Amino acid sequence: VLRSVLLRGPRAGLLTAAGICSGLFIHATLSALGLSLVLVRSATAFEVVKWLGAAYLLFLGVQSIWQALRLPSESEDTSPHSLMVPPRQSWRSLGEGLLSNVLNPKVAIFYLAFLPQFINPGDAVFAKSVLLAAIHFMLSIAWFSAITLFVGRIRRWITRPQIQRRLHACTGALLIVFGMRLALERR
């Protein structure tokens, strides 16, 4: 979310948050259908999702570092509008958020472990799973929106090329570390 706000503006941050939170419904559905159980019990399935997620985080990290290297120098136009991607392109943030959530095996395992605690025998499993995901969605959207609005307010200061380079480099390095950590993690 932070990366999207800094790179493309608050609208992109909100779309990234919506993508991440929309992924919760996919995990809730998979959990309700028992597919998450396959992920937990099948070492191969877990490894495939883990490696896809790690590769995606590494891709985002490298992309962020590449962006840091491509930022304009102090002498170039550094107004907030010159650093923004056109609004129609910011929709890719929705997809980035969704993919980062759906390809995270930890979220699938969390939903498999968490949701059943709140589902009683005789409950409509799918309906209750979606309800719980909706609650999680609302809480997460509120949190990510607060972060987006805060960063959006200080974005003018943050959009200075010198600061942007450091932030993109740090964000990229963190994403690469998270990707490597996920890739090297054992079940």
Image (cartoon, rainbow, N blue to C red):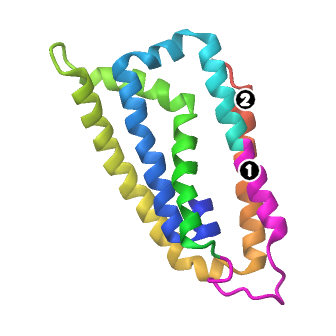
Q: Position of residue 28 (x, y in %)?
A: 37, 30
Please, is residue 64 above or below residue 98 in the view? below
Residue behind mark 1: 61
Q: Residue furthest left?
A: 122
Above-or-below relation of 102 to 20 = above
Magenta residues? 58-83
Specify few, some or many for label 2: CA neighbours under 10 Å numbering under 14, 14-19, or 20 or more.
some
Residue 75 occupies quadrant: bottom right
Amino acid type of the residue that numbered disc 1 sits on in the rendered structure: Gly
Q: Looking at the rendering, in which quadrant would you find the C terminus?
A: top right
**Residue in the image at 44% along x and 17% along y:** 35
Q: Secondary structure at mark 2?
A: helix
Question: Mark 1–mark 2 contact, CB under 8 Å?
Answer: no
Which image quarter: residue 25? top left
Look at the image and say whether residue 67 sits in the magenta stretch: yes
Left or right of 153 in this view: 133 = left
Residue ID for mark 2: 183
The quadrant in which the N terminus is found is bottom right
The x, y position of residue 13, in whole percent, is 52, 63
Q: Say what amino acid the circle numbered 2 marks.
A: Ala
Residue 7 is a magenta residue: no
Query: Which label is found at residue 107?
Result: none
Q: Say which residue appears at 39% left-offset and 50% top-offset.
A: 140
Tag count? 2
Image height check: is 153 above or below 112?
A: below
State which quadrant residue 172 falls in.
bottom right
Residue 132: x %, y % from top left? 28, 35
Describe the element under mark 1 as helix, strand or loop: helix
Residue lying at 57% horizontally and 10% vertically, measured from the top left: 42
